[in-house]
C-alpha cells in the first residue's frame, strides 16, 4: 500500500499552527490535522479523503500538557494509562483502546476526533469503486448512502471512539483553537450529529486539550466495552457511567459506538430519577438507555444485537460504580 | 573426560616442530568434522529403540527403521534449522527479492461481480510516461488450474470476470505510483451479468453459468462437482435408538497467513524464466507457467522463497505469477508484484462457506448405525482444489468410528465470489465438527458419557474403513484416554456451573494424499531426495519439499543426521530451486514429513552404506558389527577399533569423488475401485482428541476458550517441539474459525472485511492455555514411525468448543463462527422457547448414566486389549468396518447382508429424499440431455 503524497507541516506553537491553517485556507488548499496518525494515515493509505496538506501537532509543546485536570491532545493513550494523576476511569478506558502497540502512538485528541466508521466506507479505493462509492466519500459522484439507501442528506457512519463517553460522564470540556481565536465547549456539545461533519470544529480549528472540573476526581466511574476480541477492535458498543458515590442525582451515563456521535443520557437519567423518587433501579435504567439508541448496520456486529447489549453494558457499568451502595 | 577424536591428524597440516612452515609445503590441514566439539559423544541410548539395544520404549512394537536409528536427533526437541534466518530478519520472503533494474507490476481488478468484457482499450495506459508494459487476457489464452480435471483459470480474465477483484489486466511501470495511476487509465466496456451469491441458488439453472463445461456441464446450473457415496447396510438406520440431526451453516474462512503473496519474474539473458515466489507447491506453478506461457518446463526455474505461512493458501498456481512473467517478458526487465492484504482476500482459496446437514443414528447397543451427510459448499468463482474438497467433506468422516452405514451427498457450486480452495484440514474440518457434535447429542440421548461412546466405537489399528481406506497405526484410543485424564473430565463434564463448560472433539486426517494430483504413481515417485557428500564432510541434501514454516527442511535434516549419526549442523538442505531440486509434489495434504522424510531416509541409507563399506575395507569388520555414532564408525564391541567419519568418507570417495545417493518414496496401491475411491486415500492417517473448556458470558453471548488438552497421534514425534508448535498453532487457527473468523459477504455480495482489523483472527488475549499431548502410535510405514502433525490437530478444536458451549449453556449452536451475536441469538431463542427472561436463570444439562453406559465401558475395555494386540502385530487377523456389527471380515460384506451397498450414484427411488447438495443429482449432464432430446 502506497501512501498518497502530501505535504507535512510541523508548526512549533499553537499560533504558528493557526496561522498556517489560515494561510492554507486562504490559498484554497484543503488539509487535515494529524496527532498520532493511527486513524488518519491508514485512511490515507486507503485513499479515503486524502488531503494535499497535513499539519502535525507533534511539535507543539502546549499539546502535551498532562495533569489531573488538563490533558493535551498529543498525550498518547499509553501515557494516559500510565499516569497516576489521571482519572481512573480515563485510564481504564484508554487501556481498552486498540492494541498496546497502537496506544504508543494514538493520542487523546485523535481518539476524540476519530473519524466515523462504516464498512461501506473504510475500504480501499478499488473496493469503494465497486460499490459506486458512498455518500461519505463520493469522489464527486453524489453517491447515495449505502447503509440507508435513498437518503443522501445525513451520513450514519458510526463514531467508535472509546474516550469520549468517559470524558462526558466526568463533565469534561474541550479547548478548541483556530485562526479566529479559541473557545471552550462541553465534550457532549463537541459532537455534531452527522457522520461526515462529526463535530463542531470549523475549518482551521483543532482540539488543543481536554479539561476536567476539579470535582471530577470525586467521581467513581466504570466503562463497559463490547468487542469481539480483547485487542485491536473498536467498540461495537460502549457505556460509561459515573457518579459521586451515594449521590444518585450526580449519575451520568454516556454511550459510544452506537450512532454517529457519542451520546450523553442525562434526559433518560432525569426521567428515571423522577419516576423512581430519586433512586436508581439498575434494570429499568438500563432498559431506558437501550431504548434511546439506534445503531445501524455498518460495524462488525449486527445492530439489533448491539442495541440489546446496551442494556447489559449499562447494567454492568452501574453495578460497577455502585459496588458498595 | 575425553573420547575418541573425530578429526584425522593433528589438524595443523605439515608443520615443523617449531611451528614454522616446511619449505615448499603449504599449510593445508585436512578438513575436520569436529569443530569446537572434536570428541565423539557417547551413544544416546535414551533415543535408541529398545528393540535394537537402546532404552527408548516401543509400546507399539518394533519398526522397520529402528535399525537406522543412531540416537542423534530423532525424538529430540530442537529449533527449526531455518529459525535463525527468520528471527534475525534475514530470511528472504517473496517481497524481499530485489533484482537489478526491476519494475513494479500492478493488477487491474474487476469492480463487478459478474460481467462480460466487451472491449479493453489500453491506449491511455500505454501513453502514460513510465509505463513499461501492459497485458490483458488476450496475452495468455491458455487455461490452467491446480487440478488437471478442472483447469478453469486464466492469467487474466478472458471474456468474463467472475467476482469483484478478479484479474482483468496488468501493468508494469517504473514505480508503484505510476503503476497505480496507470490502472485508472484502462477504458473498458462491460456487459453486466446476473451474479449468483447464494450457493443454494447455484444449484438452479442460470442463463449464464459462471463456467461452461460443455457436454459435462450439469444442465445449466452452477454446480462444479457433485458427489454421491453410499456404503453399508442402510436398513440399520431405521428405528434408531438415538438420533441426531443438525443443520449447520459455516462461514468461509481465510488462512490469514502473515506474508501477502509476492512474486518476482525475470527472463534471464538466455531467455529462461526465473520466477521467485513463496509457493507451497512450486512444481504445480512450474507446470502451469509452462502451459500458460507456452514455454517448455526446462526453460523455467521456479525459485521458492521463504514462505511466510501458507496453510493451503499458497498451493494453487496463481494468476499473478503468470502476470509477472508475462509483464517481464514484455517489458524486458524483472517485474515484482506484491499484494495488498485486500488482494490476498480476493485471491482467497480459503475454507469453503458450507451448509452441512448431518443425520446420525445409533442402535440399542450404542453402535453408530449410520452417518448421513449432505454438504453444499460454496466454491466461489473458480474450481481450485474444489473437486477434492467435494469428496473430503464426506469421506474423511468415515473414521475413526466403525459405522453401520455411510451416506454422503456433496455439491460444490460456483458463485460470484473469490474462489475457495484448500485450507489446513482441507475439506475435513466442517463435517468433522458437525459429526462430533452429533455424537455428543446422541450420547446425551443415550445417557452415556460421550468419551465412552467414542471409545466403544473406534476402528482398531490395521483395519479398513467403510469407504475402503486402509488404517495402519491408530492412536485414537490413547489420545481420548489421555485428554480425559489430563482435563479431569470425569469430575467436570455436566457438573460445571452455568457459563462454564467442557467439551470433547476428535479428529482424523490424511497423512499424505495417496494419489498425487499431477502424477502417475506407476511412473514416478511422490518424493525424491538427492544427497551429496564431498570431501569436507558436509552433507548437502537436495529436495523439492517446500518449507512453509511447518519445518519440512528441519525434518529432512533431522532424518539424514539420524541415519548418518552426524550433528544436524553438518546437514545442508537445498530446497529452493526447481533447477537443482528433484521434483516434490509440494506441501499439501500433510504429505511432506511422511513422504519426503521416507525418501530422505532411503537416500541417507545409500550414503551410509558407502561409508560402512569403506570402513569395512579399513577395519576389516563387516558392517553388521559396525556402529555409527557421532562422526565415527567403530567395531561394536570395542570403540577403539574404528575410523572417523571423515576417514571413512575419504576412503569411500577415493575412486568416485563426492558420494551421491538418492531415495524416493511411492505409496503402496490402496483403496477400492468405486468412483472417488482415491479421494481420502493415504498411506497413513493421524488421529486426535481434544478437550476444551470455555467460559460463556450468557448475558452477552461472548465465548472464551480457557483451556485445551490436545492429544494428537503423529506416529512418532521426530521433533517434539515442532509437533507441539503445530498443535498449539492449530488450536489458534481452529479457534479463529469457531469463535470469530468469517469472510463476510454483505447484502450486495461484496466481501466486507478484506483486512486484518475486520477479519477477526484471535489475538493473544483469546488464546487459551493449550496442553499439547503427543501420542506415538509408530506408523509401520512412516519415517521412523512418523505421521502428519500439521493439519489434523486443527480438526478437534471446533467440535470441542461447540460441545463445551452446550455444556455451559444447554444450547446447541450450529452457526459458525460462534460470535457473541450468534450465541446471544441462540440464548434468546432458547429463553423464549422455555419461557424465561433472564439468561442467568438458564439451567445447564446434567448427566445420569443410563443402562448403556456400563455396556459401553465394558466394550471399550475389550477393544483396548484388541487394539493393543493389533497395534503390536501380535494379532494379524483381518479387520474391516462391519466386524462390530457381527460381520466376517474375511468375506465380502455384500455377500453377508442383503442390502449392503457400495454406490457412487443414487438409486432413482433415492432422488426424492436427497438433501440440499443431493439435489444436484436431480439434474442431468448436457450429454445426457442431448441423448434424451
Image (cartoon, helix red, strand yellow):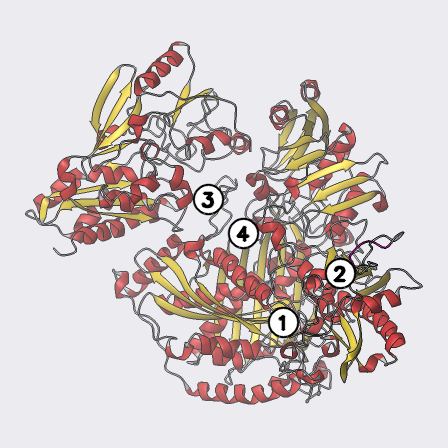
A312 displayed left or right of B133:
left
Give the CA separation, mark 4 to mark 1.
Answer: 37 Å
Where disc 3 sits, the SS reads loop
SS assignment for the magenta stretch, majority: loop
State the residue lying farthest toward the right.
B655
Give the CA separation, mark 2 to mark 4.
Answer: 26 Å
- Within-10-Å neighbours for mark 4: few <14, some 14–19, many 20+: many
Q: Chain of mark 4?
A: B
- Mark 2 and mark 4, same subunit? yes
* Of callouts 3 and 4, the N-terminal one: 4
B156 displayed left or right of B441:
right
Q: Chain of mark 1?
A: B
x and y percentages locating residue B45 in the rendered image? 65, 79
State the residue lying farthest toward the front.
B18
Front residue of B116/B619: it is B619
Give the CA separation, mark 1 to mark 3.
Answer: 41 Å
Residue wearing tag 4: B252
What residue lies at 52% left-to-right and 75% top-to-bottom? Answer: B361
Where disc 1 sits, the SS reads loop
For the residues bearing labels 1 and 3, Cβ distance under 8 angstroms: no
Residue wearing tag 3: B758
The label on residue B645 is none
- Mark 3 and mark 4, same subunit? yes
* Of callouts 2 and 4, the N-terminal one: 4
x and y percentages locating residue A228 in the rendered image? 39, 50
Front residue of B686/B85: it is B85
Q: Which residues are magenta?
A: B18-22
- Within-10-Å neighbours for mark 3: few <14, some 14–19, many 20+: some
Residue wearing tag 1: B75
- Closest to the camera, between mark 2 and mark 1, is 1
Which quadrant holds residue B492? Answer: bottom left
* Of callouts 3 and 2, the N-terminal one: 2
Amino acid at each position: 500500500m502506497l501512501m498518497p503524497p502530501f505535504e507535512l507541516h510541523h508548526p512549533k506553537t499553537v499560533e504558528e499552527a493557526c496561522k498556517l491553517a489560515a494561510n492554507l485556507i486562504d490559498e484554497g488548499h484543503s488539509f487535515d490535522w494529524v496527532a498520532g496518525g493511527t486513524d488518519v494515515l491508514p485512511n490515507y493509505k486507503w485513499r479515503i479523503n486524502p488531503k494535499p496538506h497535513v499539519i502535525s501537532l507533534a511539535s507543539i509543546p502546549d499539546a502535551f500538557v498532562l495533569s489531573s485536570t488538563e490533558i493535551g491532545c498529543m498525550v498518547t493513550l499509553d501515557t494516559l494509562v500510565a499516569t497516576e494523576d489521571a482519572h481512573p476511569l480515563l485510564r481504564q478506558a484508554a487501556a481498552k483502546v486498540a492494541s498496546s502497540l497502537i496506544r504508543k502512538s494514538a493520542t487523546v485528541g485523535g481518539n476524540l476526533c476519530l473519524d466515523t466508521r462504516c464498512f461501506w466506507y473504510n475500504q480501499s479505493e478499488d473496493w469503494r469503486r465497486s460499490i459506486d462509492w458512498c455518500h461519505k466519500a463520493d469522489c464527486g459522484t453524489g453517491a447515495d448512502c449505502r447503509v440507508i439507501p435513498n437518503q443522501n442528506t445525513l451520513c450514519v457512519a458510526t463514531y467508535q471512539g472509546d474516550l469520549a463517553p468517559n470524558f462526558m460522564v466526568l463533565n469534561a470540556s474541550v479547548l478548541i483553537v483556530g485562526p479566529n481565536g479559541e473557545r471552550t465547549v462541553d465534550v457532549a456539545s463537541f459532537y455534531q450529529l452527522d457522520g461526515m461533519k462529526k463535530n463542531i470544529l470549523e475549518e482551521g480549528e483543532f482540539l488543543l486539550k481536554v479539561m476536567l472540573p476539579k470535582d471530577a476526581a470525586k467521581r467513581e466511574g466504570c466503562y463497559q466495552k463490547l468487542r469481539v476480541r480483547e485487542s485491536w477492535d473498536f467498540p461495537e458498543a460502549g457505556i460509561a457511567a459515573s457518579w459521586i458515590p451515594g449521590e444518585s442525582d450526580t449519575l451520568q451515563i454516556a454511550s459510544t459506538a452506537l450512532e454517529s456521535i457519542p451520546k450523553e443520557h442525562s434526559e433518560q437519567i432525569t426521567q428515571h430519577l423522577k419516576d423512581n423518587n430519586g433512586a436508581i433501579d439498575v434494570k429499568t435504567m438500563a432498559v431506558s438507555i437501550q431504548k434511546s439508541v439506534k445503531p445501524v448496520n455498518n460495524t462488525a456486529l449486527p445492530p439489533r444485537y448491539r442495541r440489546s447489549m446496551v442494556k447489559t453494558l449499562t447494567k454492568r457499568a452501574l453495578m460497577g460504580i455502585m459496588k458498595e451502595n | 573426560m575425553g573420547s575418541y577424536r573425530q578429526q584425522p591428524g593433528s589438524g595443523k597440516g605439515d608443520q615443523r616442530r617449531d611451528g614454522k612452515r616446511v619449505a615448499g609445503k603449504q599449510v593445508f590441514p585436512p578438513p575436520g568434522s569436529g569443530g569446537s566439539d572434536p570428541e565423539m559423544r557417547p551413544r544416546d541410548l535414551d533415543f535408541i529403540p529398545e528393540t535394537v539395544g537402546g532404552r527408548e520404549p516401543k509400546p507399539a512394537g518394533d519398526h522397520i527403521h529402528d535399525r537406522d536409528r543412531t540416537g542423534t536427533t530423532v525424538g529430540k526437541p530442537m529449533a527449526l534449522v531455518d529459525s535463525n534466518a527468520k528471527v534475525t530478519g534475514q530470511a528472504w520472503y517473496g517481497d524481499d527479492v530485489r533484482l537489478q533494474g526491476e519494475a513494479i507490476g500492478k493488477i487491474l481488478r474487476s469492480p463487478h461481480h459478474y460481467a462480460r468484457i466487451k472491449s479493453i482499450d489500453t491506449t491511455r495506459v500505454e501513453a502514460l510516461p513510465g509505463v513499461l508494459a501492459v497485458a490483458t487476457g488476450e496475452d495468455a489464452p491458455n487455461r490452467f488450474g491446480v487440478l488437471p480435471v478442472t483447469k478453469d483459470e486464466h492469467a487474466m480474465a478472458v471474456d468474463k470476470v467472475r467476482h469483484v477483484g478478479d484479474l482483468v489486466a496488468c501493468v508494469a511501470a517504473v514505480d508503484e505510483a505510476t503503476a497505480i495511476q496507470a490502472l485508472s487509465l484502462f477504458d473498458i466496456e462491460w456487459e453486466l451479468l446476473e451474479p449468483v451469491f447464494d450457493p443454494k441458488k447455484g444449484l438452479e439453472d442460470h442463463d449464464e453459468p459462471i463456467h461452461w463445461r460443455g457436454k459435462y456441464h450439469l444442465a445449466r446450473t452452477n454446480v462444479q462437482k457433485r458427489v454421491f457415496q453410499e456404503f453399508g447396510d442402510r436398513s440399520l438406520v431405521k428405528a434408531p435408538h438415538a438420533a441426531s440431526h443438525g443443520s449447520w451453516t459455516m462461514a468461509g474462512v481465510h488462512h490469514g497467513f502473515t506474508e501477502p503473496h509476492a512474486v518476482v519474474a525475470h527472463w534471464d539473458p538466455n531467455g529462461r524464466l526465473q520466477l521467485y515466489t513463496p509457493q507451497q507447491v512450486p512444481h504445480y506453478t512450474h507446470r502451469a507457467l509452462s502451459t500458460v506461457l507456452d514455454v517448455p518446463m526446462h526453460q523455467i526455474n521456479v525459485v521458492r522463497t521463504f514462505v511466510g505461512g501458507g496453510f493451503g493458501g499458497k498451493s494453487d498456481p496463481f494468476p499473478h505469477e503468470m502476470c509477472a512473467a508475462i509483464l517481464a517478458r514484455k517489458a524486458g526487465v524483472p517485474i515484482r508484484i506484491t499484494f495488498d492484504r485486500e488482494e490476498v482476500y480476493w485471491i482467497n482459496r480459503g475454507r469453503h462457506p458450507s451448509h452441512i446437514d448431518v443425520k446420525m443414528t445409533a442402535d440399542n447397543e450404542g453402535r453408530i448405525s449410520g452417518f448421513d451427510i449432505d454438504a453444499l459448499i460454496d466454491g466461489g468463482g473458480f474450481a481450485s482444489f474444489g473437486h477434492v474438497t467435494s469428496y473430503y467433506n464426506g469421506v474423511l468422516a468415515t473414521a475413526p468410528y466403525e459405522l453401520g452405514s455411510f451416506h454422503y451427498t456433496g455439491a460444490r457450486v460456483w458463485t460470484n465470489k473469490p474462489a475457495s480452495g484448500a485450507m489446513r484440514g482441507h475439506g475435513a474440518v466442517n463435517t468433522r465438527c458437525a459429526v462430533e457434535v452429533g455424537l455428543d447429542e446422541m450420547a446425551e440421548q443415550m445417557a452415556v458419557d460421550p468419551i465412552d461412546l467414542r471409545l466403544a466405537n473406534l476402528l482398531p489399528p490395521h483395519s479398513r474403513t467403510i469407504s475402503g481406506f486402509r488404517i495402519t497405526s491408530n492412536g485414537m484410543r490413547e489420545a481420548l484416554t489421555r485428554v480425559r485424564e489430563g482435563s479431569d473430565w470425569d469430575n467436570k463434564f455436566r457438573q460445571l456451573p452455568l457459563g462454564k463448560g467442557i467439551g470433547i472433539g476428535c479428529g482424523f486426517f490424511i497423512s499424505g494424499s495417496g494419489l498425487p494430483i499431477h502424477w502417475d504413481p506407476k511412473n514416478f515417485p511422490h518424493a525424491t531426495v538427492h544427497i551429496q557428500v564431498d570431501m569436507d564432510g558436509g552433507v548437502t541434501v537436495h529436495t523439492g519439499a517446500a518449507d512453509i514454516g511447518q519445518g519440512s527442511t528441519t525434518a529432512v535434516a533431522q532424518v539424514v543426521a539420524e541415519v548418518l549419526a552426524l550433528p544436524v549442523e553438518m546437514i545442508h538442505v537445498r530446497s529452493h530451486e526447481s533447477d537443482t531440486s528433484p521434483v516434490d509434489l509440494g506441501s499439501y495434504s500433510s504429505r511432506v514429513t511422511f513422504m519426503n522424510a521416507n525418501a530422505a531416509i532411503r537416500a541417507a541409507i545409500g550414503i551410509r552404506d558407502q561409508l560402512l563399506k569403506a570402513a569395512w575395507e579399513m577395519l576389516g569388520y563387516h558392517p553388521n558389527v559396525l556402529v555409527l555414532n557421532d562422526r565415527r564408525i567403530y567395531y561394536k564391541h570395542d570403540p577403539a577399533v574404528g575410523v572417523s567419519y571423515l576417514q571413512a568418507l575419504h576412503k569411500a570417495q577415493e575412486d568416485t569423488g563426492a558420494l551421491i545417493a538418492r531415495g524416493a518414496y511411492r505409496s503402496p496401491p490402496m483403496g477400492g475401485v468405486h468412483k472417488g475411491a482415491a479421494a481420502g486415500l493415504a498411506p497413513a492417517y493421524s488421529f486426535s482428541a481434544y478437550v476444551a473448556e470455555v467460559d460463556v458470558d450468557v448475558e452477552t453471548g461472548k465465548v472464551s476458550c480457557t483451556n485445551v488438552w490436545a492429544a494428537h497421534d503423529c506416529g512418532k514425534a521426530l521433533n517434539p517441539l515442532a509437533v507441539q508448535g503445530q498443535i498449539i498453532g492449530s488450536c489458534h487457527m481452529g479457534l479463529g474459525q469457531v469463535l470469530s473468523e468469517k469472510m463476510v459477504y454483505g447484502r450486495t455480495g461484496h466481501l466486507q472485511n478484506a483486512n486484518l482489523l475486520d477479519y477477526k483472527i484471535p489475538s493473544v488475549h483469546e488464546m487459551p492455555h493449550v496442553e499439547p499431548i503427543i501420542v506415538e502410535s509408530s506408523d509401520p510405514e512412516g519415517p521412523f514411525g512418523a505421521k502428519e502433525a500439521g493439519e489434523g490437530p486443527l480438526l478437534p478444536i471446533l467440535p470441542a468448543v461447540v460441545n463445551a458451549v452446550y455444556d455451559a449453556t444447554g444450547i446447541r449452536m450450529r452457526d459458525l463462527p460462534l460470535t457473541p451475536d450468534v450465541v446471544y441469538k441462540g440464548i434468546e431463542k432458547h429463553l423464549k422457547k422455555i419461557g424465561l427472561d433472564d439468561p442467568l436463570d438458564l439451567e445447564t444439562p446434567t448427566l445420569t448414566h443410563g443402562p448403556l453406559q456400563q455396556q459401553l465401558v465394558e466394550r471399550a475395555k475389550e477393544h483396548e486389549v484388541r487394539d493393543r494386540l493389533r497395534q503390536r502385530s501380535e494379532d494379524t487377523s483381518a479387520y474391516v468396518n462391519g466386524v462390530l456389527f457381527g460381520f466376517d471380515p474375511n468375506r465380502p460384506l455384500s455377500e453377508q447382508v442383503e442390502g449392503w451397498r457400495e454406490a457412487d450414484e443414487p438409486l432413482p427411488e433415492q432422488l426424492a429424499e436427497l438433501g440440499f447438495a443431493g439435489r444436484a443429482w436431480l439434474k442431468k449432464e448436457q450429454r445426457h440431455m442431448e441423448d434424451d432430446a
